[in-house]
Image: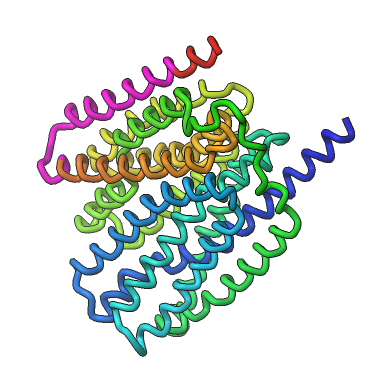
Amino acid sequence: MSERKTSIKKAYSAIFMLGLVSLLGDVVYEGSRGIIPDYLKYLGASAFIVGAVMGLGELISYVSRLAGGVIADRSRSYWPLVFLGYGLIIALPVLSISELWGGWILAAALIILERLGKGLRTPARDTIISFASKALGRGKAFGIHELLDQIGAVLGPLALAAIMAITFSYQLAFAALLVPYLLLMITLFFVYNSLKVYGEPPPRPKEGGKEVLDRSTVLYIVAVTLNTIGLFPASLILYQASKLTELGVLGAWFVPVLYAGIQLVDAPLALLTGIIYDKIGLTMLFVPFIATILIAPLAFQGDLFSILLAAIIFGFVLGTKESVYRAAVADLSPAHARATAYGILNTAVGAGALLAGAIYGYLIDASAPISLILVIAAITQIAAMAILVLLIKSRRVE
């Protein structure tokens, strides 16, 4: 019993410290994210360039997660990829010099470089969390990590907004990000020295070791991808909300406040749903899958109450995705291929989100009937739940 308590205590310590690293990383990334589009415009980039740079950055982020996962598993070098990925966040404080030299071209290159780092580190980091959290409960562990991560996501934009309000200088705002970046790297070195054992997976099995992902993991990834395709994106919820500001129903402050509200719902529910997942397992996924059906028709409705409700439900689904969805990968995939599983999942979800944005964006422009929106959302989620049922049954047979 004493050994178990010690193991749980070490797991809590590991998850908290890794969460603190993510918190500091989000202070830098999320802090800069809110002002990067305006900064590129300030440097002379056109709207097309701004959209292309941001879109390419996200594409590289998701594609590189697959590469990062495969590299991590084949080399079994999880910590080096974590250090490389977080180290590349230095690109964001360096944005301050692009005002003096290089202009928007240098800024664009730095933005894309940081997104590459995000992709490379994420599968390796999540794999380390999965190794560290075995004694604690993976749902709870990923929930704690997401809670800390979201604290950084809220603090970062607030800090950058305050600096911009005081200095009116993009250069100083980006330069100030060097402080949390240095704290991030110092913390990461400390975490590594304390927890490097968690970057050492169990030995690769002699038989079946060549199999990258088993049937259960593949079914799970397909189910989550279908869920994502039917999930109305946060960006389009904000787009619908902006119509209310254009009509004068609410001020321009409403859209960023609504986005912050989504993050605030996400954080505590990530922990709560993670704890529930540890008790009931994959059955927990039926709840966010069903909730996803409601978001699109509510957002399309377009009135204030419907948009607020859509944002709240989206925050719940997002919180579940960041805890339960990640924890389930760890429970389903073999240790020697876990980073690859995370890489494939992240890439598939990224592609699904891109498809969802294109589909729902087109339907908004076409003023499609809400009944059609509801049908699309329902079909994707019914398909996702059917695969989830098949997955749960197959697990019981095993």
Which of 60/303 is in front? 60
The residue positioned farthest toward the left in the image shown: 366
Task: Give the residue at x 54% y 67%.
Answer: 87
Q: Can residue 254 be seen in this view?
A: no
| Left or right: 348 as drawn, with respect to 319 | left
Which of 302/296 is in front? 296
Task: Give the residue at x 42% y 39%.
Answer: 345
**Rendered position, 107 above or below 197:** below
Q: Residue 227 location, x and y as percent?
A: 35, 31
| Left or right: 378 as drawn, with respect to 337 | left
Tell me where residue 248 sits by quadrant.
bottom left
Q: Quadrant of the C terminus?
A: top right
Instruction: Give the dominant element type of the magenta stretch: helix, strand or loop.
Output: helix
How many numbered marks appear? Answer: 0
Q: Residue 247 location, x and y as percent?
A: 19, 55
| Left or right: 199 as drawn, with respect to 209 | right
Residue range (magenta): 363-390
The residue positioned farthest toward the front in the image shown: 206
Queried whether the magenta region covers residue 381, the answer comes back as yes
Queried whether the magenta region covers residue 394, the answer comes back as no
| Colouring used for the render | rainbow
Q: Can residue 239 be seen in this view?
A: yes
Q: Quadrant of the N terminus?
A: top right
Which of 88/375 is in front? 88
